[in-house]
Amino acid sequence: MKTPSSFKNGDRPLFKKKGVCPHFLGQLVASPSVSSVSPEYDMSNRAITELLANWCEDIGMAVEVREIPDAPGKFNLVAQLGEGDPDAGVALCGHTDTVPCDPQLWSSDPFTLVERDARLYGLGTCDMKGFLALAITAISELSPRQLKAPVRLVATADEESTMSGARFLVESGWKIGRYAVLGEPTGLRPVHMHKGIMMLAIRVIGQAGHSSDPSLGRNALEGMHAVIAALLSFRDRLQAQYQNADFAVPVPTLNLGRIFGGDNPNRICGQCELHVDLRLLPGMDAASLLADLHHTVQQALEGSGLSHEWIPLFPGIPAFSTSPQGPLNQLCAKLTDQRPISAAYGTEATFLQQLGCEVVVLGPGDIAQAHQPDEYLALERVEPCITLLKKAIHALTAD
């Protein structure tokens, strides 16, 4: 596996035998790689992929980079150290992109790594360029001769928006090994399950007219009032039917996140749109739930003369679940002295499962710092994370 010649540059860090290379993390932070469903914020991850590709080659890894066919300018990277069965070994996985940010809300430049108060500040330090830096540092301290199975670094695009990178991994059938450590911010606690996510828009369509005579139109905003009432009743039924005490929020959630419609007080509202976020527990059937949701909205509007449309806002993330007694979870529990827990946020874990991997979500950041101004990675997490990764790699791949 070789990197295309276009993925070269001359600015490469010198890896230390011990500890993380600050220059490396600084260069990752300095390479903007925002992904967003809003085109005005979205950008390519080419530059950061170039850095990762070159630095992986510098430490002796074979590198393959692929552009995502349906997402021009977006790239996935898989780098490998050691030889052996492509279905064996361990992959350290992370995404190269970040959410957008407002630099005016930051105390320092979000694209410049700053050490302050025993913390490393910068966009992506927590979620999750920091993990990529620590993962490469851990791999750089390995000798291929110690390995009985390959070690891989997997870096994907667009986790913060469409997850096109993870989806392309699955579509292309990339072999990344038997085990995968996904370095999302968990505070170095192993996560063995999380909820699934669906986001959609419901658009109610009526007919505009002069507000002085309601018979001249059909009010979409009034129809949406009925839809919202039906959705809240649907949520109550859903939460009565499904519970999982292993989650801090033990029920599925349905959030009414955004509503807009109409254009003037003296005009009957012709269209109204509602954006909804659903978080599903492991084991819930997303297709069946969506069918029930469609039926609920249709019933709410029956006889009103109003029509409606469904618009997917996000392709969705399946719920993730593995046994806390599985070998990878048990290994990470032993290494961290922490039992596997659940998380409310979504990750790429289910896509890695579809590649045949046993997956644990485990990273040095804290979710409370993710997607926030002044995002940071605590320095006290740096060396423990490197040590943990090296021990996990040794246990899973070494003779």
Image: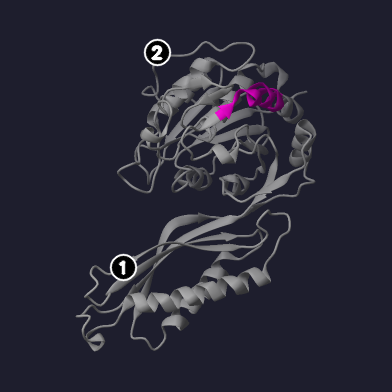
Residue type at mark 2? Gly
| Disc 2 residue crowd, few under 14, some 14–19, many 20+, Cα 10 Å | few
- Left or right placement of residue 101 versus residue 335 in this view: left
Q: Nearer the viewer, residue 146 or 191?
A: 191
Residue type at mark 1? Gly
Q: Which mark is residue 27?
A: none
Q: Which mark is residue 261?
A: 1
Q: Quadrant of residue 245?
A: bottom right
Q: In the structure shown, which secondary structural element does the residue marked by tag 1 occupy?
A: strand
Residue 73, compared with residue 9, is above or below; it is below
- Which image quarter is the C terminus in? top right
Coordinates of residue 329 in the picture (x, y in percent) = 75, 41
Q: Is residue 180 magenta?
A: no
For image coordinates 52% across by 20% down, the residue present is 115
For image coordinates 59% across by 18% down, the residue present is 20
Q: Which residues are magenta?
A: 377-390
Q: Which mark is residue 10?
A: 2
Q: Nearer the viewer, residue 190 or 118?
A: 118
Q: In the structure shown, which secondary structural element does the residue marked by tag 2 occupy?
A: loop
Q: Nearer the viewer, residue 276 or 288?
A: 276
Q: Quadrant of residue 152?
A: top right
Q: CA distance from mark 2 to mark 1?
A: 53 Å
Q: Quadrant of residue 15?
A: top right
Q: Nearer the viewer, mark 2 or mark 1?
A: 1
For image coordinates 54% across by 44% down, the residue present is 173
